[in-house]
Amino acid sequence: DAMVIQNPRYQVTQFGKPVTLSCSQTLNHNVMYWYQQKSSQAPKLLFHYYDKDFNNEADTPDNFQSRRPNTSFCFLDIRSPGLGDAAMYLCATSRDRGSETQYFGPGTRLLVL
Amino acid sequence: AQSVTQLDSQVPVFEEAPVELRCNYSSSVSVYLFWYVQYPNQGLQLLLKYLSGSTLVKGINGFEAEFNKSQTSFHLRKPSVHISDTAEYFCAVSDLGSGTYKYIFGTGTRLKVLA
């Protein structure tokens, strides 16, 4: 059974057109993360939520926002996608901070035309 | 600051041969260590993790890794690989002492199993 679900799996958007990626989890975990992974690179953490507490990475562009309306769902909003934002976007969860194992979803591949 | 080094960006190996994927980390405090596998166009799947205790950790799909504190290494091994093991493998470290929550990932090793 899927534990971390991401929709859609593939997303095509136009340059500058806002896009939202979705993540849901059935694990009831406190922490949800968003990573950006470009081709042949390691995943890069954009931000995370610890419960309702939002934590942004210092180098995450303002173009990227996130919402967590409840425990199960978390959204990644890209306000004005540029060509450089084309990447795989991974959602992950963990029960708590620190040493806890992170569980990843299948990812959404974003293409910007 | 923490860092994770995966020295080999690509490792080709013949089917049924053994393989070792190397991972070294730098940290001034105790760490937790992880290996994840990523198949094409998929998310990351946990292979194994070291939290404490025995330094030899066994994971899924016949993989194992050994934590070596003196060498700050956590190399991944499999005695006999299969075509289906072709994937990208990421080593990650989570720092216990700084109160941070982050994974620091290595840049990945692409394992290519040849028939």
Image: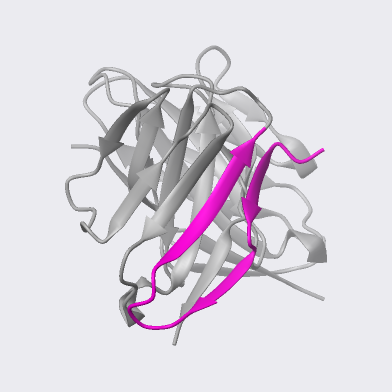
Q: Choose top left, top right, bottom left or bottom right for residue A48.
A: top left
> Quick check: A90 above or below B74?
below
Residue at 70% over, 36% down: A3
Q: Position of residue B109 (x, y in %)?
A: 51, 61
- Given residues B8 and A60, the one toward you in this image is A60
Residue at 31% over, 32% down: A54
- Given residues A80 and B24, the one toward you in this image is A80
Can see residue A102?
no
Residue at 18% over, 52% down: A59
Magenta stretch secondary structure, dominant = strand
Q: Position of residue B64 (x, y in %)?
A: 66, 37
In the image, is residue A3 part of the stretch drawn in magenta? yes
In the image, the segment drawn in magenta is A1-25
Residue at 61% over, 22% down: A28
Q: Position of residue B40 (x, y in %)?
A: 65, 67
> Quick check: B47 above or below A77?
above
Relative horizontal placement of residue B110, taking residue B80 as reference (left or right): left
Q: Choose top left, top right, bottom left or bottom right for residue B30.
A: top left
- Given residues A7 and B92, the one toward you in this image is A7
Relative horizontal placement of residue B68, taking residue A55 as reference (left or right): right
Query: Considering the image in quadrants, where does the N terminus of chain A appear?
Result: top right
In the image, is residue B68 part of the stretch drawn in magenta? no
Q: Position of residue B56 (x, y in %)?
A: 60, 25
Can see residue B26?
yes
In the displayed image of the protein, which residue is found farthest to the bottom? A113
Query: Considering the image in quadrants, where does the C terminus of chain A appear?
Result: bottom left
